[in-house]
Image: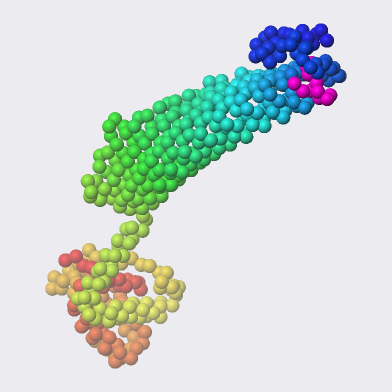
Amino acid sequence: MEMFDDTILELLSKNTDIAKIVDLEKLSQQPGFKIEQTNSYVYIGQVQNGLKHGTGILKLLDSFRIYVGEWKNDKKSGLAYEKFQSGAEYFGNYDNNKQNGYGEYVWANGESYKGNWIDGKKSGYGEWFGQNTSYKGEWNNGFVEGKGVYQSENGDQYTGDFLQSMKHGLGEEQFANGDKYVGSFKNGKPDGYGEYYWKNGSLYQGFFMDGMRHGHGVWQSNTQGKIDRYEGAYSNDKKCGYGEFLWSNGTVYKGNYFDDYRQGYGEMYQNGVIFYKGEWDRGIQVEKSNTRFQFQQKMKTQETTARKWKFNNIDEIQELEEETVTSGAEGKKENNPKITQKNSQQCRMKTLNVESKPSNSDFTPMKRSLQLQKKATPAIQTRSRTQSMGNCKIPILQQKQRSNSNQINNNQKLEQLVKFSPYKQTLRIGRFKLQKIQL
């Protein structure tokens, strides 16, 4: 008992606040004063109807835990001091065995809370102090919730809304490096519309998601007075989608982005004049592989249109040309049975050398190349022709048997049409092709 008394006296001497609660001399003179000891605890104080009631001291044996304060019907109630097994201490109000009202709690690691309590949990306005960090604001059910000011260990300071001890809602965060963010937060990170200001003067105004720029936004840099500006889509903190970039020198890009690079179709302007439009690959201008092919197809279409405009019977010319090629190829197969027959679509031969010119100056290259030499006897059903181009003479393949009337009519029609054709006919081993002659 003496040892217990010494412990109480030492505790009271070191804690003046506790001494204000308990005066052992006065306590011993209070009605119902009693000293009760069991195998687990010792109680010195007032008792009513066998229950702790009034002022009393409860000390748990083999433990650091001790309670000094008011009791009501065997429950802690009123102003009191309590030291816990963990080494933490609390001085404040109790109700129904729990902290209620104003109280101060100090953890063993030095952290502290001064504020309101409800049913043993921090609720209402309170101030929490840690090592180089603090929070001053509203609490709810033990969590930081409502409006408050939080300062982190690295010097960042956030002022705004909280939910479940996380930044949530509208707020402003001033960073230790000089940057600042003003806008919406969700689960501790910027989410929704917000504005980020760098200390060097750059800024971003737009939408965030999970702490990263995401959605439509405007970014503007400020480097030594030179301002670059981008307005467009973002995804996961990178430019992605359609956007427009304006450089300080007046150059403008309008087009698609992906992973922070110009990607896909885009156009470049300088002083309002476009100087490139086309495809991009990771920020580099590229030309599609079929661009040249499309240009050639377009030129061929224009050329064909011009021919049809000049010659209304161009379809008949092409029909006779195709017929000559077919008959010539079949005739050669008949005369050369040893030659393996090949699919005409798979057999591609070289055209004649267009630089060859006829030795006879009486004929122009155009007329000479289109002139068909005929044999004297038209009655023969299968006959050969010779087409001369310069000094190069190539035997024409024998044609299949046809009626004399059809053969003569075709030759006459072809001769009549080729007089007006500006194209050169070349024939070699079953391959027929028209080529424009440069005069």
- Magenta stretch: dominant secondary structure: strand
Write the start and end of the magenta stretch as one range.
42-54
**Does 43 lie within the magenta span?**
yes
* Quadrant including the C terminus: bottom left
* Quadrant including the N terminus: top right
In this view, the residue in front, 205 or 436, is 205
Q: What residue do we see at 34% from left, 32% from top? A: 201
The correct choice, above or below, for 123 with respect to 303 in the image is above
In this view, the residue in front, 24 or 426, is 24
Determine whether, in the image, residue 296 is placed left or right of residue 55.
left
Name the spot of residue 209 as percent of width and height, x first: 48, 43
Name the spot of residue 394 as percent of width and height, x first: 29, 72
Name the spot of residue 309 as percent of width and height, x first: 21, 75
Determine whether, in the image, residue 86 is placed left or right of residue 316.
right
Q: What residue do we see at 24% from left, 85% from top? A: 413
The correct choice, above or below, for 261 with respect to 342 in the image is above
Q: What residue do we see at 18% from left, 74% from top? A: 367
Determine whether, in the image, residue 19 is placed left or right of residue 168.
right
Visible residue check, residue 397: no
